Image (spheres, helix red, strand yellow):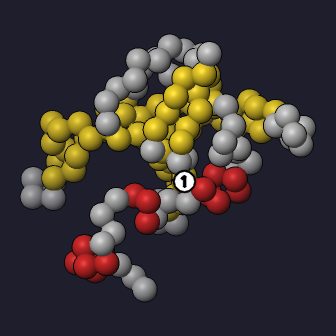
Amino acid sequence: MIFNNENKQEAGINDWHAYYSADVVTRLNMAVDGDFLFCGQQAEPQRKWSKESKAYDDEVTGYGYWVCQNYVDEETGQLYQQNPILVVIDGYDRKLNFGDRLRFDGLAGYYSRKKRSYSFRADSVEAIK
């Protein structure tokens, strides 16, 4: 079934969890529960889109973090390597430094066939010491 905006609201689909999946992340040879390295200078603010004005509002809805993965699973010995990806997390800016080790909770991805691109979101992030 194709969802338009009215059908999404009637079905109770209000956020990204309905579209994003952890399977997309694993198909790209990334470990969902693995460690990631922060490889950006700072978090990128994600702004809300206004349909009326067809522009981004000043309201910040979350922050995007550029991360890459170079992780070896201790149980299987499998190496997971990935070029930098942008993971968006709702909420406040977590102050991270280049090279910090991170672990995401609820990491999921989405592939847009129209744009032929991937996007990633997570519920939360924690820095690993």
Q: Is residue 16 left or right of residue 107?
A: left
Q: Residue 123: image x %, image y %?
A: 45, 44
Q: Position of residue 34 (x, y in %)?
A: 69, 37
Q: Which residue is mark 1?
A: 109
Indicate the quadrant containing the N terminus: top left, top right, bottom left or bottom right: bottom left
In-front residue for pair 51/80: 80
On the image, which quarter does residue 104 sit in? Answer: top right
The answer to whether residue 61 shows anywhere in this view is yes
Kindly identify the residue that appears in the image at 64 percent across and 60 percent down: 23
Residue at horizontal 39 percent and vertical 82 percent from the top: 2
What residue is rendered at 46% in x and 64% in y? 19
In the visual, does 117 lie left or right of 18? Answer: right
Depicted 6 relative to depicted 129: above or below: below
Pick the front one: 117 or 107: 107
* Residue 4 in sight: no
Question: Is 116 on the left-hand or right-hand side of 28?
Answer: left
Instruction: Give, as a three-letter code, the residue at label 1.
Output: Gly
Pointer 1: residues within 10 angstroms few (<14), some, or many (20+)?
many
The residue at 25%/79% (across/down) is 10
Q: Quadrant of the C terminus?
A: top right
Q: Against 113, is 121 above or below?
A: above
Q: Position of residue 89 (x, y in %)?
A: 41, 39
Residue 110 to residue 74: above or below:
below
Looking at the image, which residue sits at the far left? Answer: 52
**Considering the numbered disc 1 on the image, is that residue within a helix, a strand or a loop?**
strand
Residue that sits furthest to the right in the current view: 77
Badge count: 1
